[in-house]
Amino acid sequence: MIKQCAVAAAVGAIVLMMACSSCSSGGSNGDGGSGGGSCKNVAICTVVPASTVTSAIGLMVSMANPDMPAQNPWNDRCDYISNDPGKNARFIRTCFASASDASNVFASAKTGSLKSGGTRTDVTGVGDQAFYQSEPTSTMGVSTVKLQAIKGQVVVSLSDVYVTAADDATVKQGLTSIANTLLSQ
């Protein structure tokens, strides 16, 4: 477990360094990739309000908490907090310095390790590429899921930490729709 956390932290640090390298304060690096557009901040909590998250994935959101980390001006995040402890979602949109940097980070995430019993499948109709993964939690019948997609130099990572098998298809469909919304920004 400690080793997995260390690997996740290292990948996160690489993501931040790659995303921020050569981003200009003007917000454009000229490498639009295949439709990712220029780097700009996206107020995820505004573009995808709590009510949309509730209707799309069934999470009863009581608060949407935006975060635009100062260390990376092109990494936007929104945490959707539920009144039910432990049932939260996090959406992250990162604009990289180039489509190549974004592709490398996406490929690394797609080939990363999964918990025992976890699954990862390709998803069509989202950006240039996308995958959906589900990993079991310590609660029987409950998984943590993530949809990650890339379009040009933009990567989105959408996670929901408490998904039952009965809700999985609905959550996957909702996250797919939200990913397309965030990739179009």
Image (spheres, helix red, strand yellow):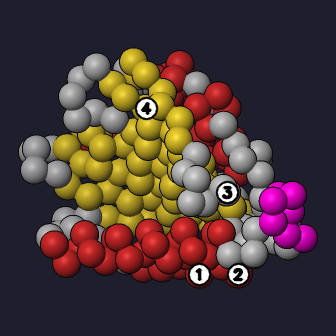
Residue wearing tag 1: 104
Which of label 1 and label 3 is nearer to you? 3
Q: Quadrant of the C terminus?
A: top right
Left or right: 163 with respect to 107?
left
Residue wearing tag 2: 100
Which label sits on residue 80? 4
Say which element carries label 1.
Answer: helix
Q: Quadrant of the N terminus?
A: bottom left
Which of the pair 169/135 is nearer the observer? 135
Tell me if label 1 and label 2 are in contact, CB under 8 Å: yes
Say which element carries label 2.
Answer: helix
Q: Which residues are magenta?
A: 24-30
Q: Is residue 175 above or below residue 85?
A: below
Circle 4 crowding by C-alpha within 10 Å: few under 14, some 14–19, many from 20: many
Residue 72: x, y in percent?
A: 60, 60
Identify the residue at image location x=19%, y=78%: 3
Give the residue type at disc 2: Ser
Give the residue type at disc 1: Asn
Which of label 3 and label 4 is nearer to you? 3
Q: CA distance from mark 3 to mark 4?
A: 20 Å
Residue wearing tag 3: 74
Q: Does 25 appear in magenta?
A: yes
Q: CA distance from mark 4 to mark 2?
A: 30 Å
Looking at the magenta stretch, what is its main secondary structure?
loop
Is residue 113 something that shows in the picture?
Answer: no
Q: Is residue 161 above or below residue 30?
A: above
Mark 1 or mark 3: whose residue is earlier in sequence: 3
Q: Is residue 49 above or below residue 42?
A: above
Give the residue type at disc 4: Tyr
